[in-house]
């Protein structure tokens, strides 16, 4: 897992990337929906609860940011989110 950040205007973009199993394009949007239970096995064959990204999305949006996923099956994933940076706050 690799975590990076980059300032983009008034926002900080944080990227969490991995080299795991990746996510099918048709499954990405399901990961943010509370009304659709979607969970797959991880690289260690562990089963998730299906709540982690829903909670992340809620936290990010309540703090004025956005979250998105970039992924390809078999190539890992990049989870990116932005949060506003207040003026005068140093990185």
Image (cartoon, rainbow, N blue to C red):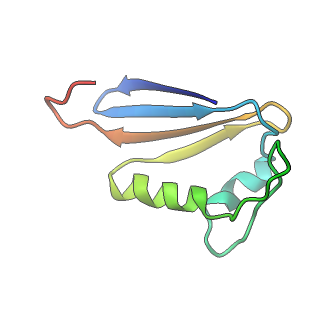
Looking at the image, is 89 positioned above or below residue 58?
A: above
Q: Quadrant of the N terminus?
A: top right
Residue 50 drawn at (x, y percent): 68, 63
Q: Quadrant of the C terminus?
A: top left
* Residue in the picture at 57% in, 45% down: 68
* Residue in the picture at 13% in, 29% down: 88
Looking at the image, is 82 positioned above or below residue 91?
A: below
Q: Residue furthest bottom?
A: 35
Residue 66 drawn at (x, y percent): 45, 47
Q: State the image quarter where residue 6 is shown.
A: top left
Closer to us: 50 or 9: 50
Closer to us: 26 or 48: 48
* Residue in the picture at 61% in, 71% down: 34
Residue 47 drawn at (x, y percent): 78, 59
Looking at the image, is 56 positioned above or below residue 33?
A: above
Residue 64 drawn at (x, y percent): 33, 51
């Amino acid at each position: 897992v690799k975590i990076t950040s980059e300032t983009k205007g008034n926002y900080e973009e944080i990227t969490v990337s991995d080299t795991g199993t990746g996510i099918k394009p048709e499954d990405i949007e399901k990961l943010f929906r509370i009304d659709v239970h979607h969970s797959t096995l991880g690289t260690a064959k562990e089963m998730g609860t299906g709540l982690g990204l829903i909670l992340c999305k809620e936290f990010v949006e309540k703090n004025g940011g956005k979250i998105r996923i970039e992924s390809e099956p078999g190539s890992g994933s990049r989870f990116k989110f932005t949060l506003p940076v207040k003026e005068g706050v140093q990185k």
